[in-house]
Image: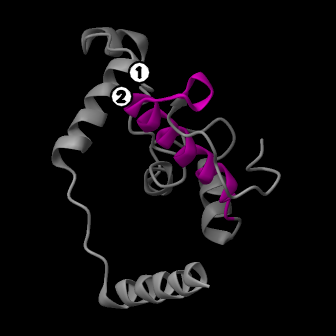
Amino acid sequence: MTALAGANIIYGVGMLELGITVDYSQLVISNDIIKMVRRCLSGIDINDETLAVDVINNVGSGGNFIMEQHTMNHMRTEQSAPGLFNRKMRYNWEEAGSRDIADVAKEKAIDILENYQPKPLSDKVKGELNDILAEAEKDLVK
């Protein structure tokens, strides 16, 4: 709700117990939720391509839009795609082991901690950060 009101800072990501505890699994879950919220906030493009009036006219009332190439081109890019939340039918989820979100998030958090390699900062960004730090240090000395 705060994102819809225009807030651009999200506080408490990964926090439990009023911030006394930070849980990496909760952090990963929160990240997925934030991605979905950001997708909602980006809105819906309205133009000739997305309106697909020609497809609607060709398929007609009661027709099958799912098999249209236009639908295939847009269905994957127009909806949010969470990395943790399982949107499969229940029987597919059960066949895959019935893993709950806490287990999936814990596994993802461990994978990130063990394998993530951050991209190095560009020289330009490093220079800007050094300038900011130098300015802050001047203020501290005063």
Horizontally, is 59 left or right of 94 in the view?
right
The residue lying at 66 percent from left, 46 percent from top is 60
The circle on residue 105 is 2
Compared to residue 107, the image places residue 73 above or below, namely: below
Horizontally, is 52 left or right of 125 in the view?
right
Q: Name the residue under label 1.
A: 101
Front-most of residues 1 and 95? 1
Whether residue 137 is in magenta: the answer is no
Q: Can residue 52 be seen in this view?
A: no
Residue type of the residue flagged with mark 1: Ile
The quadrant where residue 129 appears: bottom left
Q: How crowded is mark 1: few (under 14 residues within 10 Å), some or many (20 or more)?
A: some
Q: Can residue 56 be seen in this view?
A: yes
The residue lying at 31 percent from left, 84 percent from top is 122
> Is label 1 in a helix, a strand or a loop?
helix
Number of numbered discs overlaid on the protein picture: 2
Q: What stretch is highlighted in magenta?
A: 16-45
Q: In which quarter of the image is the N terminus?
A: top right
Residue type of the residue flagged with mark 2: Ala
> Is label 2 in a helix, a strand or a loop?
helix
Front-most of residues 61 and 102? 102
Q: Residues within 10 Å of mark 2 (few under 14, many from 20)?
A: many
Q: How far apart are marks 2 and 1 (CA)?
A: 6 Å
What secondary structure prevails in the magenta region?
Answer: helix
Determine whether label 2 and label 1 are within 8 Å by CB: yes
The circle on residue 120 is none
Q: Where is residue 38 in the image (x, y as percent from the top left)?
A: 61, 53
Whether residue 22 is in magenta: the answer is yes
The quadrant where residue 81 appears: top left
Q: Quadrant of the C terminus?
A: bottom right
Give the colouring mode of the picture: one colour
